[in-house]
Amino acid sequence: MIYTNSVGRALQYFPQHFGRTTHAKPVLVRPPYGLYPMKIFYVKHLRICSLILLLVWALQPTAKADPVPVRSVAGTIHGFLELRSEDGQVVASGDSIQVVHGDRVTSETIFRFNDGSVDDETTVYSQHRTFQLISDHHIQKGPSFPHPTDVLINAQTGEVIVHSTGKDGKEEVKTDHLDLPPDLANGLVPVVLQNLPLNAPVTTVSMVVVTPKPRLVKLVISNVGDDKCFVAGYSRKAIRYDIKINLGGVAGVVAPIIGKAPPDIQIWTIGGDATTFARERGPLYPEGPIMTIQLASPTWPDTPKSGH
């Protein structure tokens, strides 16, 4: 499960605030005689050239990445997860349930929060030679989410349906159609990582985000090395991936400049003959706190011994 909706804040921020000052008063400094007109000409010329280059570079079309090949066929599983806040407290209990019918996989990851909130994502995809998203339905609701959302993506038709709450408190439903690429990875990022070869270069996949209007962004995935972790006291090697969100276009250039670039997300996997997801760190919603998702094990209360 991966959350990237914070990119919308950069797009909303840019038109109103970039380049504006409100408190500083202009100060006129008279330059030496004869230099002022020439300097102004060159400064304006450089600014115009820089802006043209910026826009030309930002608006260059990007090549569509191919879908990730199937290296490890997904099977039916039921795993347990926990969600921890920045201070290490468990704030939600999660289930990851995956069912396979032929070459079609239905995967649901649901978190039930201590305050009654719910984060529920159901992803349907095929795994015939490559992984292909069929649909993704992601719901976030409850006190833990300032802006509850319900987003349904139909990758086969390109239809994106967004249920949200308007300023008047009434439900709003908006439908958009996008030209969705074959490498669309909503709900599939852990699956993608589990199927990357260890020596794979930087991998790029696409994702739909709501800003609040649906749009496509690129996820740039890099293997940044190994970290040590422990399983029941035994040392294991975990591979750490860094995921950068590339907004594309002018927004992708401007967002870092104005401090509105979405944060990177880290995911750890444990390899071997069968690679498995182990941990994820990142925000759950726009400008939200950094949370940690990791595997959990069932525990039992102490019970009296037999015969007592």
Image (tube, rainbow, N blue to C red):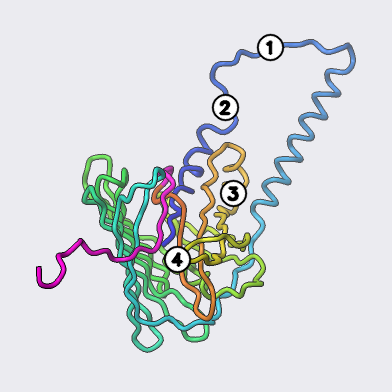
Marked residue nearer the N-terminal end (2 or 4)? 2
Residues marked 3 and 4 touching at CB (< 8 Å): no
Badge 4 density bin: few <14, some 14–19, many ≥20, Cα 10 Å: few
* Mark 1: amino acid: Val
Q: How many marks?
A: 4
**Magenta span contains residue 296:** yes
To which residue does mark 1 refer? 27
The numbered disc on residue 231 is: 4
Q: Which residue is mark 2?
A: 20
User: Which kind of residue does numbered mark 2 sit on?
Assistant: Arg
Q: Which residue is mark 3?
A: 252
Cα separation, mark 1 vs mark 3, equals 33 Å
Which residue reaches farthest right?
34
Q: Identify the amino acid type marked 3.
A: Gly
- First along the sequence among labels 1 and 3: 1
Magenta stretch in the rendered image? 286-308
Name the N-terminal-most of marks 2 and 3: 2
Q: Secondary structure at mark 2?
A: loop
In what quadrant of the picture does the C terminus appear? bottom left
Residue at 32% from the left image edge and 51% from the top image edge: 90
- Give how far apart the Cα atoms at labels 1 and 2 are: 16 Å
C-alpha gap between disc 4 and disc 1: 64 Å
- Front residue of this view, candidates 303 and 212: 303
Mark nearest the camera among 1 and 3 is: 3
Query: Which residue is located at x 60 percent, y 30 percent?
Result: 19
Residue at point 66%, 72% (across, down): 199
Question: Percent position (x, y) of residue 64?
Answer: 60, 69
Dots 2 and 4: beta carbons under 8 Å?
no
Residue 131 place in picture, x, y as percent? 49, 78
